Each structure stands twice: as C-alpha cells, then as structure tokens.
Image (spheres, rainbow, N blue to C red):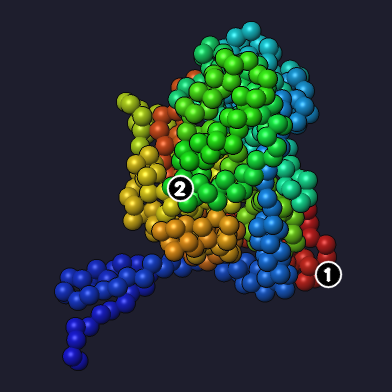
C-alpha cells in the first residue's frame, strides 16, 4: 500500500465514527434505507407498466404550460363565490379543527364581508356550522391557491392566470404585504381597512393596467427572477420590480386617478413579496396540467391548513394524503420565539411542488438570512431535491449550478425509497388568532403521507393488474 487508505461508509455513522477515531479518512455516503413498511408497495409500483410513460406524460404536460396574467377580478366574478363562501389554504378542514391563524383570517374575512359586525363575533357564527349559511372549502378545489391561511371571499380581488395553449385558468388573491395581515391571521381594523382599499382601489387600477398592457408572461418572469437571485417563495424582489416595470406605464395611461396610481405603485413597490401571489398560481396552472394521469407517481400539490399537511398525486385523482403539519425551524421577528409559532400553513408550497422555492435555494443565497441556514446549505438542498424528482425544468435554470434546471416533479416512489423529504421555505404565523407573522424558516412535510400515497398507487396498480377498474 503506497497511500493512506480511504474508507467509504454507507448508512448510519457508527462505523465512520469509529474509523475517524483511528485517524483514517472516512468518506460518508448520505444514504438511508427506504421508509419503513414500503418495500412491497415500492415493488408493486415499480412493476406497474403504466408508470414510466405516465410520469413522462405528466412532466411533459407540466413543462408545456405557459402562464400568463390576463386579468384581475373580484373573486365573486372570477370564482363565482357567493356571500358566505370562504375558501382556505390546504386540505379540507372545519372551524373546530382550524388553527389560530386560520381562525383569525376567517374572523377577519367574516367581518370584511359584513356577515358579523365585529371579528370577535365570528367564532359563534362559524361554530353554528352549515346552518349559519356559510361554506368552507379548499382553494385547491376551485383552481385557486392562497398563501398562509389563504382565505378568499367574494369581495377580494384575485389575479387571473391562463395557459396560452389550453385556456385553463388559475387564481390567487392579491398580496397584502407582511406583518399584521389577514393571511397570517391578523384581523384588526387596519388590516380590514387595507383589504377594503385593495378591493376599491388597487384591484381596479391593476385590472385596467393588465387589460391595457395585454397578457404578462409570468412563466418568463419566473425564469428571469431565478437568474436574479429570487427563489420565488420567500424572495420575490426581482419579480415584483419586473412586474412594476411591465405594468406602471399602463397604470399611468389607464385613466385611473393619479393619486390612486401613485398609491398602488407605492404599495406594490414597498412589498417585496407581491409577486409571490403570481408565482403561486403560475405553478398551480402547470401542475394542474399534470393531474389525473393513471399510473403517474408525480406529486401535483402540497398544501397546509395550519393543522394538516396534505399532498395530492397525479395518479390518485383528488384524494388528499394528510398528516400533522410541522412547526418550521427558522428565524423569529422581534421578541417572538418557537412557542409563538403555529404549525406550517398555506398553499405556497405549490412553489416547491413545481420545483422552485426551497427546491431552488441554490439560486438565492440571500434567502438564507431570512430562513436560516448557510450558502452551502442552499446549494446542497437544491442538489438533494434532484434525488426525489423526475426531471429538470429547462426554462427555470440556476446559474451557480452551471445553469442546471430546477428539480421538477416530486416522485412519491423516490421520496419513499430515499427517505428524503421535500424542503419548503415558509413564513411562520403566530399560533394565537390575531397575532400575524412571527418569523420565517424551513420545514418538511410529515413523513407518513408519502407511504400513504404510495400504498394508494400500489393498490391501483394491483387492481389494474387484476383487470378491475381502480377504486376512486
């Protein structure tokens, strides 16, 4: 032997630690066994003759979408919401199981719609159940997405995004800013006043501008902002400024009052997260195109309601696979700490589902100061997400990784086989209704939802093999 030996270790660190103690170099391979109890289901899905082609179709459908901002409308008009209809983030939930920020947002929205005189009167209204004359349904069931609590009511205005080739549409409310805002569960008078201004001034100003300037190619803006240091979940500074660049001339020429235009430009320009509410529906539009492909193991939605974390998979229709939402690990505002934070909430994980946000951490090193971690962590995260995805997105590339495409199409089988969970960048809402934002950080889904989805895919594969129609 002419050189010092190097030992490669796999799995737990016990052997590597012992070798280190003997002053021998140990190269540790980051590997974990498949998730417990998934071996039979992994084998069944791997043998499914539909899987490879179905996943190729799902990825192609996803990549084929070009999302354009075509209009800005009241939710009553865009989504057909009636008085008493409430949409919310995440999988289905009722008032009794709703978390503090979800309840706070519903309380504020009930007052905004005039269903109660004061937000503090709203708990009794919601506890009365369906007999009180309201409905509560996930945004995802209406081709919509909402950040954090994601509460949408008829008077709120929404962005309307459309796929240029199919005409399919998705929707998202306008972004309110940070701090004490409805989506973080705050419902004070200033929160409601801001929402009324957004409906009476901001929405109409943006509507005239979008209709005058023509469609805005949001997919292309996402490609540019990823080159400029945004990961499009917790950092949207470049995207927001590019949107203003495209819309301000039309806003000025739109015939809106000069003071209203000035207020609208100041509001959007002062809110670095404004573009998030365009990134989210753009991602949903692309992922919706990949839905309902029998045999596909691709995740098409990840969403949280502050109590449950749910995923939907292309090959299992609209079925939700849920587990308890986790509390994010990150940085806190002011004097807030971990005891103040609510478990993860919001539809914004649609960005990670589409391969940006936490999956594109490498392109946004500045984000680590907001969510915790380090620049090497960011690079490693993007590379690690490539181990659980089906493809790279050729339109959304990362300069620091030699312009590699962002990891695209979370594969349930790869998650179960590697035990690597999707990484999500997220804001943190206060657990007490009315608090607002308390921080931002990193979080992963509950582990058990992926084996549950895998079991459903395996069952469908067994049913097809037996000549039976898969159970819906």
Q: Residue at x 47, y 51 (%)?
A: 227
Dot 1, crowdedness within 10 Å: few (<14), some or many (≥20)? Answer: few
The local secondary structure at tag 2 comes to: loop
Q: Residue at x 50, y 46 (%)?
A: 225
Give the farthest residue toward the top.
117
Q: Name the residue under label 2.
A: 228
Residue 84 in sight from this viewpoint: yes
* Residue 372 locus on image (x, y percent): 35, 43
C-alpha separation, residue under disc 2 versus residue under disc 1: 52 Å
Q: Is residue 357 left or right of residue 195?
A: left
Give the farthest residue toward the bottom.
1
Residue 135 in sight from this viewpoint: no
Residue 366's place in the image compared with 297, above or below, is above
Q: Which of 70 and 350 is in front in this view?
A: 70
Q: Is residue 232 left or right of residue 131?
A: left
* Residue 76 locus on image (x, y percent): 75, 25
Q: Quadrant of residue 1?
A: bottom left
Dot 2, crowdedness within 10 Å: few (<14), some or many (≥20)? Answer: some
The local secondary structure at tag 1 comes to: loop
Q: Mark 1 points at which residue?
A: 467
Q: In this view, does 370 lie to the left or right of 320?
A: left
Q: Residue at x 71, y 69 (%)?
A: 53
Residue 23's place in the image compared with 302, above or below, is below
Q: In this view, does 286 lie to the left or right of 425?
A: right
Q: Nearer the viewer, residue 337 or 385?
A: 385
The dot on residue 283 is none
* Residue 406 locus on image (x, y percent): 52, 58
Q: Quadrant of residue 296?
A: bottom right
């Amino acid at each position: 032997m002419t050189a010092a030996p190097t030992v490669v270790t796999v799995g737990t660190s016990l052997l590597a630690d012992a070798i280190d103690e003997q002053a021998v170099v140990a190269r540790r391979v980051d590997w974990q066994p498949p998730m417990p109890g998934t071996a039979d289901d992994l084998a069944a899905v791997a043998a499914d003759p539909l899987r490879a082609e179905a996943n190729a179709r799902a990825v192609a459908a996803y990549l084929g979408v070009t999302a354009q901002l075509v209009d800005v409308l009241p939710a009553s008009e865009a989504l057909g919401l009636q008085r008493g209809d409430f949409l919310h983030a995440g999988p289905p939930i009722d008032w009794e199981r709703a978390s503090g920020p979800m309840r706070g947002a519903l309380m504020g929205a009930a007052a905004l719609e005039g269903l109660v005189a004061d937000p503090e009167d709203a708990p009794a209204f919601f506890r009365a159940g369906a007999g009180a004359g309201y409905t509560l349904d996930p945004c995802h069931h209406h081709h919509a997405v909402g950040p954090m609590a994601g509460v949408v009511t008829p008077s709120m205005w929404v962005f309307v995004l459309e796929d240029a080739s199919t005409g399919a549409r998705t929707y998202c409310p306008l972004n309110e800013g940070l701090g004490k805002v409805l989506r973080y569960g705050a419902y004070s008078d200033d929160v409601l006043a801001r929402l009324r201004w957004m409906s009476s001034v901001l929405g109409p100003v943006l509507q005239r501008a979008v209709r005058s300037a023509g469609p805005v190619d949001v997919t292309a803006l996402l490609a540019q902002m990823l080159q400029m240091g945004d990961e499009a979940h917790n950092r949207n500074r470049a995207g927001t400024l590019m949107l203003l660049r495209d819309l301000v001339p039309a806003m000025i020429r739109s015939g809106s009052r000069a003071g209203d235009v000035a207020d609208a430009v100041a509001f959007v320009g002062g809110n670095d997260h404004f573009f998030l509410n365009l990134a989210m529906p753009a991602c949903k539009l692309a992922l919706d195109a990949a839905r309902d492909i029998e045999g596909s193991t691709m995740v098409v939605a990840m969403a949280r309601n502050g109590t449950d974390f749910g995923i939907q998979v292309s090959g299992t229709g609209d079925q939700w696979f849920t587990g308890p939402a986790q509390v994010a690990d990150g940085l806190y505002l002011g004097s807030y700490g971990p005891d103040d934070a609510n478990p993860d909430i919001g539809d914004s994980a649609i960005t990670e589902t589409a391969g940006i946000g936490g999956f594109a951490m490498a392109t946004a090193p500045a984000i680590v100061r907001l969510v915790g971690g380090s620049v090497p962590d960011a690079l490693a995260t993007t590379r690690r997400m490539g181990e659980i995805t089906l493809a790279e997105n050729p339109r959304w590339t990362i300069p620091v990784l030699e312009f590699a495409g962002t990891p695209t199409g979370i594969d349930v089988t790869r998650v179960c086989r590697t035990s690597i969970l999707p990484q999500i960048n997220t804001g943190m809402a206060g657990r007490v209704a009315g608090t607002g934002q308390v921080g931002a950080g990193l979080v992963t889904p509950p582990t058990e939802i992926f084996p549950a989805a895998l079991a459903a895919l395996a069952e469908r594969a067994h049913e097809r093999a037996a000549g039976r129609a898969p159970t819906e």
